[in-house]
Structure formats: structure tokens, C-alpha cells
Amino acid sequence: MNLSQMTKEQLEAFRDENQALYDSFKSQGLCLNMARGNPCKEQLELSVDMLNVFDDGNFISSCGTDVRNYGMLDGIPEAKKLFSEMIGVNEDEIIIFGNSSLNAMFFAVQTAFNKGVLGGTPWSKLDKVKFLCPVPGYDRHFKVTEFFGIEMINIPMSSTGPDMDMIEKLVAEDDSIKGIWCVPQYSNPDGISYSDETVKRFAALKPAAKDFRIFWDNAYCIHHLTDSPEYILNILEEAKKVGNEDIVYIFGSTSKITFPGAGVAVMGGSKKNIDDLKKHLGISIISYDKMNQLRHVKFFGTFDNMLAHMKKHMAIIAPKFKLVCDILNKEIAPLGIGSWTDPKGGYFISFNALNGCAKRIVQLCSEAGVTLTGAGATFPYGVDPDDKNIRLAPTYPPIEDLQKAMELFVICVKLVSAEKLLAEK
Ligand SMILES: Cc1ncc(COP(=O)(O)O)c(C=O)c1O
């Protein structure tokens, strides 16, 4: 029965029943974590053989460089070849970084701040700098812009991507808007892949600010959870078609392909953008970990092999996503007290509780030993205006733990929803 149709007496009984279930969970002293999108141990094991690829004693890159030494600031040629295919750029349109794409994004914002974009005024010298933030979104993106004192403007998401009418209007009329955060495929946390029309409209944006950049974080470009993957259009190709290729910075990494702690991160863009950023990069580092780059290339060989490797990830984590959705469908759907995504890829399930309930649900889970991503984290400044969105990260816990964590989660959702509806009676 839908909770909103219950009488006060029925709701009180429902609340008391779930309070008792909650109390008994609490006494179990659980300690489970489904806060961050970490791969589980079995996923990490998939890439361990990579550590043996230098058993042949050959440390020489295809360009003749010994990867153990300094040099090749922007990456070795075979890594550029492999990863340019992954993010859809040419081999002269990519920089291979260290192990973190977040770090590359920070570098791009920092460089714009200190040195400007393609010779423009450094953002630090401007009175106001603003960024558009599709919400819900990735908390660490928002932390980067918050760190630089950039004002963030929420942009609602729909099933085809962010609200493009709003974006086109805002960027056309306000030259202090310098960028937008996008996770275009299997977005974090909604799992939405941008439609062809959305990508084309992004590629053709005409911002008032010449130094406006789309931060196209394609972190989940090959992270499918089904055998019929979703693909998005190649934004750089689309932008080239309309003479707008400088508008986008593309990011990606192998954090959730090989190892989050020891993967390879990349950044792509027009040759002009990449050449300009490379000038600044060389001040902070002599060269990145080229042994790791070559390790990845030797391990995978081809991009097709990377895709085959991702199927092994899928076999491990797809059942975890299914478990979460099955429990929500069984326990929450009939009550009408939440909605959620059933993503075809990526790392998250986005749960929307009744307005005003997310913080308390996360708090109750935490008090009973299950840590979730903080409520509000998926919004700039940690403020979810409706206090309803909770990001669920099913990949890391063993499936038995996930089952337990979800059993507790649905009890908390029921309890908090009943409390809310009773308060409104
Ligand atoms: C959208 C998105 N971008 C970037 C990252 C972090 O990537 P990296 O490990 O390459 O810094 C994550 C990690 O969860 C993510 O969800």
C-alpha cells in the first residue's frame, strides 16, 4: 500500500514496526561501507598480472626511451595510441598524466586560474568566476571549483543530460561563466548517458566567455553493466564539425579499469588546448610514471582487449547492482516513498527519497553501522535543496554485506518516510 494513502493509525503502526526492525539491526553492531565507488578486491585481482609484464626485462618504449628514466612529459607514444582510442581523440590531442584524472582536472582549473586559457585573462584576476554544475553530480568536481572560490550554479539533469536550454541561455548572457562539469556517459550518480542532441548542443555552444570550457569527464566511457552498451557521440569530433574544437577538455582514466591507486589518467582536447597546457605542465613535473604507462600497454595490447577486460568487471559487479535494484523494487516501490535509477553502466545508483528525508536516512544508517555517501554530497556546497538524493555505491562490499546494508537501508527509508508523513498529518 502506498504510504501516503495510510491513515494516521496505520502509519503509526508501520513506523513502530520499522523502528523495532531498526533497533534490532542496530544491536548487531554492523560495520559496512557503501559510500565510495571503489572497485572490490575481485575486480582489483583482474589486473594483478600487469605487475609481471616487465619480467622480459624490456623497458624500452617504441620511441626508444627507457621508461625508467626521465623524459616524455606528455606520455609515451604507445600509451597515447591506446588511450586516445579510449577517449576519442587523435594521438597529438592527448596528455598522459599520473594515476588521477581528478588531479588533471584540478591542474586544468588551476592553470586557467593562474595563467588564463589560451592567453586569456587569468581567472584569478576576474571579479567573478562561475561554473555550471549539472545536479546531482560528482562531489569531488564541486570541491575543486569550491576550492578556487568559483561560484557554482545548479543545472537540473533529465534522462537525456543536463538542461541544455538553460545552459545555452546562461552561457550566452554571462561571460563570468567559465565552465561546466559533465560526466557524459553513465553519469555520477544518475547513470545517465547524454543523448546525441545533447552532445551536439554542447559541441555547438556559443558562450559569451571565449575562455569557457566544458570539463567532459568521461570517467565511465567503457564501464558497461549490460551486453548492449550505451555510447555517446564524440564531442571533439562534433565540435570540429562546427569549428568549435577548443571548447572542450576531455578526461578519463583507468582507475576503474585497472587500479584506482595505480592507474593511468589522460586528458584530451584540441591540439591548441593541449599544446598550451603542456607548456605549463612542465613546470610542476619532469615526467609522469612511464613504467606504469608501458605496463598498461603491455598488459592490454589493444583497445579491444580493454573492452574484453571490462566484461570481466561487469560479471563481478552487475549482480551487485541487480541485488540493490531488486531489493528497492520489492521493498520500496509498492510504498511510493522513493525512486531510483537502474543504470546500464558506471558505478552508482541514485536514490531519491521523499523531500526532506535524505539526511536523516543517511544518519540512521550510519548510527546502525552502514556508511553511505553523505546526503547533499551530490550537490555544490553539499546542499541538496530538496534533501532527497542519496548516492548508493554497490561495487565494493561483498554481496552478503551489500544485502545486509540494503536491508538496513530500506528499513531506514521506511522509518523516516513514515515519520515525515506523520508529521504532516
Ligand atoms: C566522474 C568521476 N570522475 C573522476 C573520478 C576519479 O577519477 P581518478 O581516479 O582518475 O582521479 C571519479 C571517481 O569516482 C568519478 O566518479
Image (tube, rainbow, N blue to C red):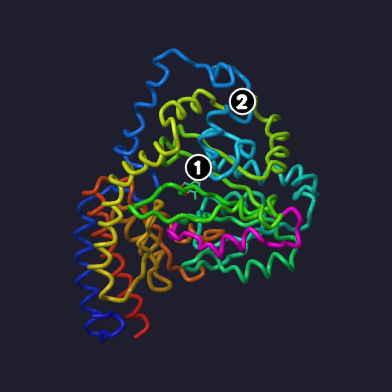
Mark 2 against mark 1, which lies toward the viewer? 1
Disc 2, SS: loop
Task: In the rendered view, tell whether residue 152 sits above or below residue 248.
Answer: below
The crowd level at tag 1 (other Cα within 10 Å; few <14, some 14-19, many 20+) is many
What is the spatial separation of the Cα atoms under label 2 and label 1, in whole angstroms?
Answer: 22 Å
Residue 240 location, x and y as percent?
Answer: 66, 52
Q: Would residue 359 appear left or right of 128 to someone viewing this image?
A: left
Q: What residue is disc 1 on?
A: 86
Check disc 1 and give the amino acid type.
Met
Residue 136 visible to an observer of this rendering: yes
Q: What residue is disc 2 on?
A: 287
Q: Is residue 190 magenta?
A: yes
Check disc 2 and give the amino acid type.
Ser
Q: Could you tell me which residue is drawn at 35 percent across and 52 percent down?
A: 225
Please report the bounds of the magenta region as a residue range.
189-212
As rendered, which of 389 and 184 lies closer to the eye? 184
Q: Does the magenta stretch include residue 42?
A: no
Q: Classify the position of the N terminus by image quarter.
A: bottom left
Q: Could you tell me which residue is drawn at 61 percent across and 19 percent down?
A: 70
Residue 302 location, x and y as percent?
Answer: 44, 34
Residue 85 location, x and y as percent?
Answer: 52, 41
Q: Would residue 54 appear left or right of 177 to someone viewing this image?
A: left
Q: Could you tell me which residue is drawn at 25 percent across and 62 percent down?
A: 326
Task: In the rendered view, tell whether residue 296 sits above or below residue 236.
Answer: above
Q: Classify the position of the C terminus by image quarter.
A: bottom left
As rendered, which of 104 and 49 lies closer to the eye? 49
Q: Could you tell me which residue is drawn at 62 percent across and 71 percent down?
A: 165
Task: In the rendered view, tell whether residue 399 sits above or below residue 297.
Answer: below
Task: In the rendered view, tell whether residue 35 sits above or below residue 411.
Answer: above
Residue 146 visible to an observer of this rendering: no
CB within 8 Å, label 2 to label 1:
no
Which SS does the magenta portion mostly show? loop
